[in-house]
Image (cartoon, rainbow, N blue to C red):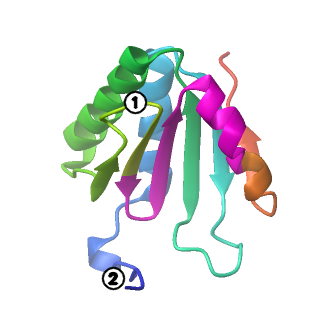
């Protein structure tokens, strides 16, 4: 079934949600945080992918929990869907227009999302 965009009054500010997710990732020491802006890529269902790497399944779960808590606390919303919490190799948090990926290193290397979505505007987040 095709995914429908939310109407204006139900749309959350994806920039704020994205920044909240990035801040949560950095608080839990995520590596290689990257934002893919795909809203201008034809035939996409999402506007942004936020990707990070965790060094273990425990860290992946901790990062995921921190993102969910932070976004729920600030915006009073939960992810539409959560996938990958069983094996913790690739946890996916769906916030409608923003899709958050938390990978273990070997899984991120295998799937190469940045290469797959090479048409996207890609921004690496650095810790200052």
Q: Which mark is residue 88?
A: 1
Residue at the image point whose x is 67% and y is 15% from the top: 128
Please state, as top left, top right, bottom left or bottom right, where the N terminus lies in the image: bottom left
Q: Which mark is residue 22?
A: none
In the image, taking residue 43 as reference, residue 22 lies left or right, namely left
Reply yes or no: does residue 93 show up in magenta. no
Few, some or many residues within 10 Å of mark 1 (<14, 14–19, 20+): many
Q: Quadrant of residue 3?
A: bottom left
Q: Range of the magenta residues?
A: 94-113
Q: Secondary structure at mark 2?
A: loop
Dot 2 or dot 1: first in sequence order is 2
- Find the distance from the CA under tag 2 to the CA under tag 1: 33 Å
Viewer-proximal residue among 105 and 98: 105
Q: Which mark is residue 7?
A: 2
In the image, taking residue 7 as reference, residue 119 lies left or right, namely right
Reply yes or no: does residue 110 show up in magenta. yes
Residue at the image point whose x is 47% and y is 31% from the top: 89
In the image, taking residue 75 as reference, residue 87 lies left or right, namely right
In contact (CB < 8 Å): disc 2 and disc 1: no
Residue 29 horizontal/vertical position (percent): 51, 14
């Amino acid at each position: 079934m095709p995914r429908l965009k939310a109407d204006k009054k139900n749309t959350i500010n994806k920039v704020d949600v994205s920044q909240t997710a990035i801040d949560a990732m950095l608080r839990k020491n995520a590596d290689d945080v990257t934002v893919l802006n795909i809203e201008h890529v034809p035939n996409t269902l999402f506007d942004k992918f936020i990707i990070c790497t965790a060094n273990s399944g425990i860290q992946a779960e901790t990062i995921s929990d921190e993102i969910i808590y932070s976004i729920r606390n600030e915006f009073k919303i939960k992810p539409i869907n959560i996938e990958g919490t069983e094996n913790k190799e690739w946890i996916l948090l769906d916030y409608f227009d923003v899709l958050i990926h938390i990978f273990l290193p070997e899984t991120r290397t295998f799937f190469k999302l940045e290469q797959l979505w090479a048409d996207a505007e890609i921004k690496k987040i650095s810790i200052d």
